[in-house]
């Protein structure tokens, strides 16, 4: 959690704030329109996952049960300890690739 807070909140805000106080720092538009909102959304996704990871199995089991996947629902409801795992890691990598693609396509001059 310390690394998450330090790298996603403190570093950009403190760096931008001190830079603007000490010099005539100009904040690039891609930073305002894409980088900071994307960092905020990513941090919110990770925080939500960390806070609800024990309840995630029950929620997914309910959804699977509604679709008639009783075997899958049974397995999901018994899992208690969650970890990021391969699927979570792949989703984070996909989120990073999406970030890069949007950044390159919409803000090519500042990349």
Image (spheres, rainbow, N blue to C red):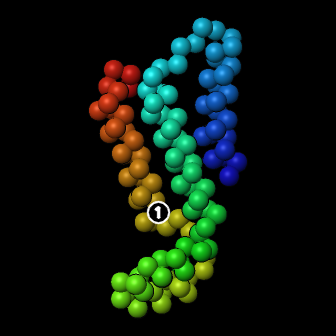
Q: Residues within 10 Å of mark 1 (few under 14, many from 20)?
A: few
Side of 7 where 27 appears, left or right: left
Residue highlighted by disc 1: 88
Residue 20 locus on image (x, y percent): 64, 15
Residue 87 locus on image (x, y percent): 43, 66
Q: Looking at the image, which residue is at 43% across and 26% down?
A: 30
Q: Residue furthest left?
A: 105
Q: Looking at the image, which residue is at 70% across and 48% down?
A: 2
Residue 55 locus on image (x, y percent): 59, 74
Front residue of 33/50: it is 33
| Quadrant in which residue 29 is drawn | top left
Q: Looking at the image, which residue is at 50% across and 28% down?
A: 32
Asked whether the viewer can see residue 48, the reply is yes
Label 1 SS: helix
Asked whether the viewer can see residue 72, the reply is no
Q: Looking at the image, which residue is at 36% across and 45% down?
A: 98
- Quadrant of the rendering where the C terminus is positioned: top left
Q: Residue furthest top?
A: 24
Residue 88 locus on image (x, y percent): 46, 63
The tally of labels here is 1
Give above or below for 67 relative to 87.
Answer: below
Give above or below for 81 relative to 34.
Answer: below
Side of 23 where 66 appears, left or right: left
């Amino acid at each position: 959690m310390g690394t998450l807070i330090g790298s996603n909140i403190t570093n950009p805000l403190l760096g931008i704030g001190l830079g603007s106080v000490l010099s005539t720092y100009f904040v690039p538009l891609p930073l305002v329109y894409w980088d900071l909102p994307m960092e905020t959304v990513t941090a919110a996704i990770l925080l939500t996952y960390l806070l609800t990871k024990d309840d995630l199995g029950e929620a997914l089991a309910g959804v699977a049960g509604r679709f008639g996947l009783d075997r899958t629902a049974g397995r999901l409801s018994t899992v208690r300890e969650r970890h990021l795992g391969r699927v979570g890691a792949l989703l984070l990598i996909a989120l990073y690739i999406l970030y890069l693609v949007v950044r390159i396509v919409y803000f090519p001059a500042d990349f």
